[in-house]
Image (spheres, rainbow, N blue to C red):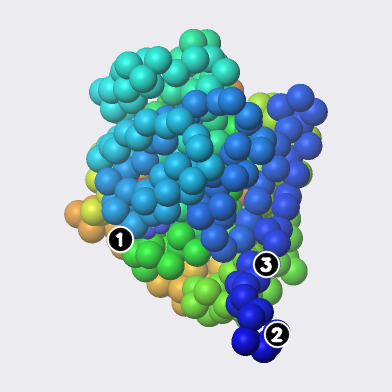
Amino acid sequence: MSSTEATTATTTVAAPTVVPVALGKRGYDILIGPGLIDGAGEELARRFPGSRYAIITDETVAEHHLDRLTGSMTDAGLDFTTVELTAGEGSKSFPVFESAIDCVLSARLERGDLLIALGGGVIGDLVGFVAGVVRRGMRFVQMPTTLLAQVDSSVGGKTGINTRHGKNLVGVFHQPSLVLADTSALDTLAPRDFRAGYAEVAKYGLIDDPAFFAWLEANWRDVFSGGPGRIEAIATACRAKAHVVKIDEKETGPRALLNLGHTFGHALEAVTHYDGTRLVHGEGVAIGMALAHEFSVHMNLCSPDDAARVKAHLEAVGLPTRLQDVPGGVGTAEELMQAIYQDKKVKRGRLTFILTRGVGKSFIADDVAPDVVKAFLGEKLRG
Ligand SMILES: NC(=O)c1ccc[n+]([C@@H]2O[C@H](COP(=O)([O-])OP(=O)(O)OC[C@H]3O[C@@H](n4cnc5c(N)ncnc54)[C@H](O)[C@@H]3O)[C@@H](O)[C@H]2O)c1
Ligand SMILES: O=C(O)C(=O)C[C@@H](O)[C@H](O)[C@H](O)COP(=O)(O)O
Ligand SMILES: [Zn+2]
């Protein structure tokens, strides 16, 4: 055999992009790239020697990606148990929270062990909350498998569940110990869920990065088709979020900017009873961001051209932008206002909104007059 024939073919996997979240003792790395689930066992064994794990996922994600993770963890000699929950927003609820806790305790995981959230934002928010309270705080690893989770929910430590009163009303700030964003997991994601996650990507441009928004307008097809722009967009979003979380971990100030589009969006999710067939979070955020720009025009803060530009881009990628786009309707302006009053940004009964002076010029507006918001919503409901 010649030396050329003897050479073993090796697959070169590009090193992941690493984005640090600089929070001192609570700091951690976000690793972004393809194949990270397959290499997770080794990564975990190196970073958390001697630990046991509970992998918590949903049934859809399990079907596509659980074997890759359990195979890798078995190869690395790790001890773990797995829990599969029902997919969808309904799992961010007290009954599912309780049953997840029961599984973790039944497996006798100790405080120093780790939970692994393998899934989208629903699994990440729920598992983070379980980790935050079981034995008064366990460590957890985020393995986000949706675009939304890779660019937003897996980073920053906001965890929690919904109640009939509103979105994310019960939860804790609890930072993960590591985020492994395997971009190849996105290949199995339904187009609707990919689009919904894109709304949160566009959000970073609209908050304070007009160049990123312009880049997305030019490159969104590459992001959707899985070209090199996809990892670039995810890394840009993670860097932006890591920066905001570093300067304001518990949202006493600028972190509220990450709520652009969410005051309206969360109200829409609440009035549609978190029914993911009618509206998913990212779609609510897309409508909410379009409304936030139109409301800013209504308040003479933003030019109609900028609001139209934002709406045009969201519509170009196939996202909804109007109240009328929600199947089955969204109720009355009064019903939406009741939901808006449960927003966590309400201070002493006064409404806070993220408004804008144009693309990439968002700001926090305290004390927005409720009758002006209600009149605006009434106008929008009339079409
Ligand atoms: N904590 C935060 O900072 C934060 C930020 C943004 C959103 N969120 C929350 O995130 C949630 C929305 O997250 P989401 O959009 O990821 O929804 P999700 O977790 O419900 O996932 C969407 C759907 O995709 C499926 N799925 C996930 N990964 C898949 C894959 N790789 N292949 C095939 N199917 C896959 C899921 O089973 C589900 O049916 C909302 O509850 C929202 O409030 C939290
Ligand atoms: O991380 C944040 O801060 C955000 O606001 C990100 C949002 O995209 C996310 O939907 C978050 O869960 C909303 O926070 P909430 O405090 O309004 O529940
Ligand atoms: Zn969001």
* Amino acid at the residue labelled 2: Ser
Q: On residue 324, which mark appears?
A: 1
Of labels 2 and 3, the one closer to you: 2
Q: Amino acid at mark 3?
A: Ala
Question: Dot 3 lies on which element?
Answer: loop
Q: Quadrant of residue 235?
A: bottom right
Pick out the residue farthest to the front.
1
Give coordinates of residue 161: x percent, y percent: 39, 29
Mark 1 residue element: helix
Q: Secondary structure at mark 2?
A: helix
- Upstream in the sequence, badge 2 or badge 3? 2
Q: Mark number for residue 14?
A: 3
Q: Which residue is mark 2?
A: 3
Q: Residue at x 49, y 68 (%)?
A: 314
Front residue (pair 303, 138): 138
Q: Report how far apart the C-alphas of labels 1 and 3 lie in the structure.
A: 44 Å
Q: Amino acid at mark 1?
A: Gln
Whether 208 is drawn above or below 47: the answer is below
> Crowding near pointer 3: few (<14 within 10 Å), some, many (20+)?
few
Q: Residue at x 29, y 53 (%)?
A: 63
| Residue 72: percent from left, percent from top | 48, 48
